[in-house]
């Protein structure tokens, strides 16, 4: 595949992230419910603090185009202008609202307005209902102690030939070679589980940074790496709940 074909394929993939129906729905929603936020964006970024009206003309994968109107005192009539604001990275309709919310917040602060943009408030309320809390919690003390002791005992039986007399009965049931292979497999499984959780947390940080940060990612990765299924089960339940909420909406 040539470089031009690859670029065309990437463009088609990007267009699929935001259908024409999504674009129209977003445009209508912003103009109908968040016209004040759109006007503030125009006033700040368009350097027209006296703009009287503003509306979204177009939304696509590249950005949002806003048109605004203001009173031109020199010509004694209203004048119009427009500007396109580029998006950084679009993953779907939700990320478009994130981008517009960021513009509205910056404009709100620059214009010295109190409070928050309405779009930001509404989006936070919706996210609070639809986003699962991924705060890390350690398993119970007994569970952690059992897992640590089990791993220590397995490592001891795998790496020590002349074991303590009280543990020699284990040798009658499981050989040192078997313990060694079990120990290696346990390490591999824990490492794979931790790697999978790390990758999913990274993806979550990119898509929903309000749900996941670097600190939580590190805690979940270490927790699953050390305590295995005890932490992985809790993480998997939250992921399952999140997908259930996405499906319901």
Image (cartoon, rainbow, N blue to C red):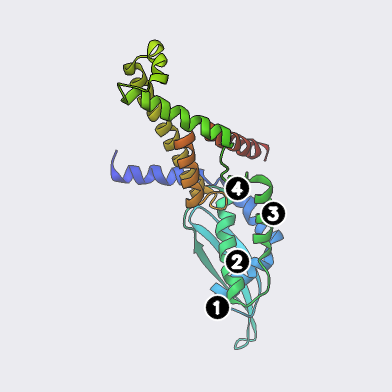
Residue labelled with disc 3: 125
Mark 3 Cα-neighbour bin, 10 Å: few <14, some 14–19, many ≥20? few
Q: Which mark is residue 22?
A: 4
Secondary-structure class at tag 3: helix
Residue labelled with disc 2: 104
Residue at 55% of width from left, 78% of height from top?
A: 47
Q: Nearer the viewer, mark 2 or mark 3?
A: 3
The quadrant in which the N terminus is found is top left
User: Is 174 drawn above or below residue 109 in the view shown?
Assistant: above
Q: Could you tell me how far apart the alpha carbons at marks 1 and 3 are, in whole angstroms?
A: 31 Å
Secondary-structure class at tag 4: helix
Residue 86 visible at all: yes
Residue at 48% of width from left, 36% of height from top?
A: 224
The x, y position of residue 217, in whole percent, is: 48, 46
Q: Could you tell me how far apart the alpha carbons at marks 4 and 3 are, in whole angstroms?
A: 21 Å
Q: Could you tell me how far apart the alpha carbons at marks 2 and 3 are, in whole angstroms?
A: 17 Å
Mark 2 Cα-neighbour bin, 10 Å: few <14, some 14–19, many ≥20? many
Q: Nearer the viewer, residue 185 or 28?
A: 185
Furthest-bottom residue in this view = 74
């Amino acid at each position: 595949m040539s470089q031009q074909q690859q670029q065309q394929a990437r463009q088609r993939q990007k267009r699929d992230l935001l259908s024409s129906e999504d674009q129209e729905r977003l445009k209508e929603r912003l103009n109908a419910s968040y016209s004040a936020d759109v006007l503030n964006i125009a006033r700040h970024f368009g350097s027209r603090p006296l703009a009287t009206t503003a509306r979204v003309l177009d939304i696509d994968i590249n950005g949002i185009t806003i048109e605004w109107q203001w009173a031109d005192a020199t010509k004694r009539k209203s004048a119009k202008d427009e500007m396109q604001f580029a998006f950084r990275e679009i993953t779907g309709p939700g990320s478009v609202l994130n981008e517009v919310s960021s513009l509205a917040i910056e404009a709100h602060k620059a214009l010295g307005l109190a409070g928050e943009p309405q779009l930001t408030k509404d989006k936070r309320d919706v996210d609070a209902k639809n986003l699962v809390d991924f705060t890390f919690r350690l398993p119970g003390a007994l569970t952690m102690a059992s897992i640590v002791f089990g791993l220590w005992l397995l490592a001891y039986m795998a790496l020590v030939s002349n074991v303590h007399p009280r543990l020699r009965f284990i040798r009658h049931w499981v050989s040192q070679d078997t313990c060694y292979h079990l120990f290696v497999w346990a390490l591999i499984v824990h490492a794979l589980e931790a790697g999978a959780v790390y990758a999913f947390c990274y993806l979550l940080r990119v898509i929903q940074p309000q749900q996941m940060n670097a600190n939580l990612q590190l805690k979940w990765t270490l927790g699953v790496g050390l305590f295995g299924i005890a932490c992985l089960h809790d993480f998997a339940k939250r992921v399952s709940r999140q997908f259930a909420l996405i499906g319901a909406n």
